[in-house]
Amino acid sequence: MTNAGDAGNNRIFLFALSTCIWCKKLKALLDSLGVKYEFVFVDLLEGAEREKTIKELLKHNPSKSFPTLLVGPHAVVGYQEDKVRELLAKCPRR
């Protein structure tokens, strides 16, 4: 996993679960929009890497729910297509 904490203002990072339908839909939306992003399937991580990733997720989403999308300094929790599109429109890195 790449460290989500070293985000710049226009970094796009997705915390997801491999079995989550909403995570899959959000990945499909980002792909269809041609967005460059990084992601991690948290449920596939183990040990220290998983703990580190969850600790980072909790900084942005204390409820630890999925998907959680970081667009620069903003976090979108759950599948919120309108909010994602709005934030991406303001983000220079696409």
Image (cartoon, rainbow, N blue to C red):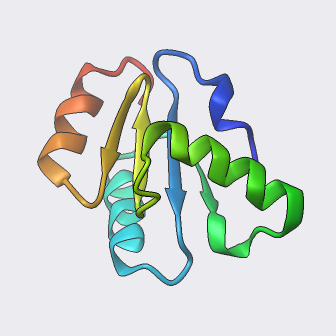
Q: Residue at x 59, y 24 (%)?
A: 7
**How far across and how far down the image is residue 8, in percent?**
56, 17
Image quarter where the C terminus lies is: top left
Q: Is residue 2 visible?
A: yes
Q: Which residue is more in the foreground, 13 or 60?
A: 60
Relative to 49, 57 lies left or right: left
Q: Residue 62, relative to residue 64: is it above or below?
A: above
Q: Residue at x 69, y 50 (%)?
A: 53
Q: Residue at x 22, y 27 (%)?
A: 89
| Residue sticking out furthest to the front | 62
Q: Is residue 37 visible?
A: no
Question: What count of labels does the image hold?
Answer: 0
**How far across and how far down the image is residue 91, in percent?**
34, 22
User: Which quadrant of the structure image shows residue 54?
Assistant: bottom right
Q: Residue 13, relative to residue 22: is it above or below?
A: above
Relative to 57, 5 lies left or right: right
Q: Residue at x 44, y 24 (%)?
A: 72
User: Which quadrant of the structure image shows residue 66?
Assistant: bottom left
**How far across and how far down the image is residue 12, in percent?**
48, 35
**How far across and how far down the image is residue 17, in percent?**
53, 72
| Residue sticking out furthest to the right | 48
Relative to 94, 59 lies left or right: right
Q: Which residue is more in the foreground, 8 or 35?
A: 8
